[in-house]
Image (cartoon, grey):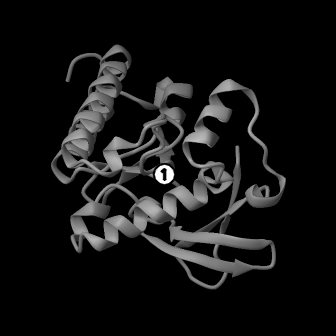
């Protein structure tokens, strides 16, 4: 885990992610993959700092001037100064009643809390989550169980939020410059993750 997350004491409903290391000063690429990635970014280690990558992509979403871009990810408020160093402020996602959300990992680790009704609700939430990515061309670096929260709404339905790893971190980031490439990459990732969900939950 490259970052630590704290509730923001200055703003209710927000959290702050703080990078554990100084990438400009202390980070050096290790191994073939990291070295190639580092070279492809002209030796700029800031591209290994996920706070930097997330903020850059969040700024591009704001530039679209569409609130729908944030339907399934928390809103990013940018960099903030803290007594632990510079962090990035985000909306803190909870259930409608204020309680903590389960992640997909929580459900896989505790299968007894996922009955047939919950599976149906989860599939509805997943399909909305997948459609949003494709329709609004939002790239997620890695759709992971631990990164995906399941928010329980007031009406009992489920809404999924991806809380980490947004943007493009491809070795050759063509998706950053081509909407067509971005759409193809997004559809590919959605298909792969949907297959994982079918293996786990069964057909919707």
What residue is rendered at 47% in x and 61% in y?
94
In percent of width and height, residue 144 lies at 48, 35
- The quarter holding residue 130 reads top left
Residue lying at the far right in this picture: please name it.
26
Q: Which of the image's four quarters has the N terminus? A: top right
Q: Nearer the viewer, residue 26 or 162?
A: 26
Residue lying at the far left in this picture: please name it.
135
Residue bearing mark 1: 101
What residue is rendered at 22% in x and 17% in y?
203
Along the horizontal axis of the image, is 99 left or right of 175?
right
Residue lying at the far bottom in this picture: please name it.
10
- The quarter holding residue 174 reads top left
In percent of width and height, residue 198 lies at 30, 18
In percent of width and height, residue 11 lies at 57, 83
Q: Which of the image's four quarters has the C terminus? A: top left
What residue is rendered at 35% in x and 66% in y?
60
How many numbered dots are placed on residues in this image? Answer: 1
The local crowd at label 1, few if under 14, some if 14 to 19, many if 20 or more residues have their Cα within 10 Å, is some
Q: Nearer the viewer, residue 199 or 69?
A: 69
What residue is rendered at 67% in x and 34% in y?
35
* Residue 61 drawn above or below residue 45: below
Q: Nearer the viewer, residue 112 or 137?
A: 137
């Amino acid at each position: 885990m490259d970052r630590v997350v704290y509730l923001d004491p200055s703003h209710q409903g927000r959290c702050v992610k703080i990078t554990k290391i100084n990438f400009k000063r202390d980070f050096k690429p290790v191994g073939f993959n990291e070295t190639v990635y580092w070279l492809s970014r002209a030796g700029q280690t800031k591209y290994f700092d996920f706070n930097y990558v997330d903020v850059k992509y969040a700024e591009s979403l704001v530039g679209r001037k569409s609130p729908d871009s944030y339907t399934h990810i928390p809103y990013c408020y940018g960099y903030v100064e803290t007594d632990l160093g510079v962090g990035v402020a985000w909306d803190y996602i909870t259930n409608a009643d204020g309680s903590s959300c389960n992640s997909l990992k929580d459900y896989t680790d505790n299968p007894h809390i996922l009955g047939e009704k919950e599976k149906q609700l989860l599939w509805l939430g997943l399909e909305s989550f997948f459609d949003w990515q494709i329709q609004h061309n939002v790239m997620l670096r890695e759709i992971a169980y631990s990164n995906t929260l399941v928010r329980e709404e007031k009406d009992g339905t489920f809404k999924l939020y991806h809380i980490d790893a947004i943007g493009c971190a491809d070795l050759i980031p063509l998706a950053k410059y081509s909407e067509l490439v971005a759409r193809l990459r997004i559809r590919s990732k959605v298909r792969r993750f949907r297959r994982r969900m079918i293996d786990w939950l069964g057909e919707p």
